[in-house]
Image (cartoon, rainbow, N blue to C red):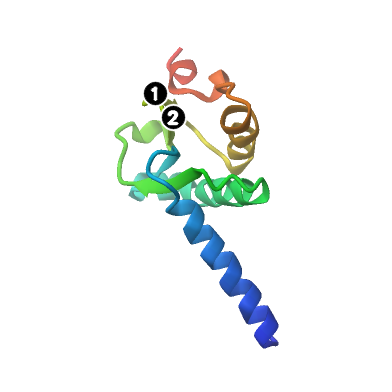
């Protein structure tokens, strides 16, 4: 950090990240499993990818949160998307690249990425 302007830029980015995590309760929620197994499998970069992509697209109506163990450790990192209407989609074996696709296809255009779901993994 070399100037106050740079510090202010870091502050604004941090506030935006917090805003994405704490948006309205009636919004779509992206929940990332961040128990020890999820973190070891790479959940932190996955969560960061969701936050960055949602920020790039100015999708402040989507809440990104974390949870503990979701219960299927062999499929970590796991991400659950809870829609406003109460439906849930569980994505497994997540990567940051998959997160970007889920934002574009599922969260923006409403098309579930079936090939990343727990149902596809269990076949």
Q: Is residue 85 visible?
A: yes
Q: Residue at x 52, y 36 (%)?
A: 94
Task: Report helix, strand or loop for mark 1.
Answer: loop
Q: Is residue 66 above or below residue 108?
A: below
- Numbered label attached to residue 83: 2
What percent of the width, then of the height, locates residue 74?
39, 32
To which quarter of the image does residue 104 belong? top right
**Residue 100 falls left or right of residue 91:** right
What percent of the width, then of the height, locates residue 29?
43, 39
Quick one: quadrant of the N terminus? bottom right
Task: Report helix, strand or loop for mark 2.
Answer: loop
Q: Residue furthest bottom?
A: 3
Comparing 74 with 50, the one in front is 50
Q: CA distance from mark 1 to mark 2?
A: 5 Å
Crowd around label 1: few <14 · some 14–19 · many ≥20 (10 Å): few
- Numbered label attached to residue 61: none
Q: Is residue 34 visible?
A: no
Q: Which residue is mark 1?
A: 87
Comparing 52 with 16, the one in front is 16
Q: Residue at x 45, y 50 (%)?
A: 23
Q: Is residue 93 above or below residue 23?
A: above
Q: Residue at x 66, y 86 (%)?
A: 4
Q: Residue at x 51, y 43 (%)?
A: 61
What percent of the width, then of the height, locates residue 35?
33, 48
Q: Are marks 1 and 2 in contact (CB under 8 Å)?
A: yes
What percent of the width, then of the height, locates residue 103?
60, 36
Q: Is residue 1 above or below residue 26?
A: below
């Amino acid at each position: 950090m070399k100037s106050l302007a740079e510090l202010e830029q870091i502050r604004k980015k941090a506030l935006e990240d917090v805003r994405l995590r704490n948006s309205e309760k009636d919004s779509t929620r992206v929940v990332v499993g961040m128990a020890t197994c999820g973190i070891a499998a790479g959940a932190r970069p996955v969560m960061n990818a969701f936050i960055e992509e949602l920020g790039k697209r100015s999708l402040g109506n989507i809440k990104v949160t974390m949870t503990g163990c979701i219960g299927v450790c062999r499929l970590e990192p796991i991400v659950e998307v809870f829609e406003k209407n109460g439906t849930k989609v569980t994505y497994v074996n997540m990567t940051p690249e998959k997160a970007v696709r889920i934002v574009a296809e599922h969260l923006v255009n409403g098309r579930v990425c079936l090939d990343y779901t727990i149902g596809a993994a269990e076949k």
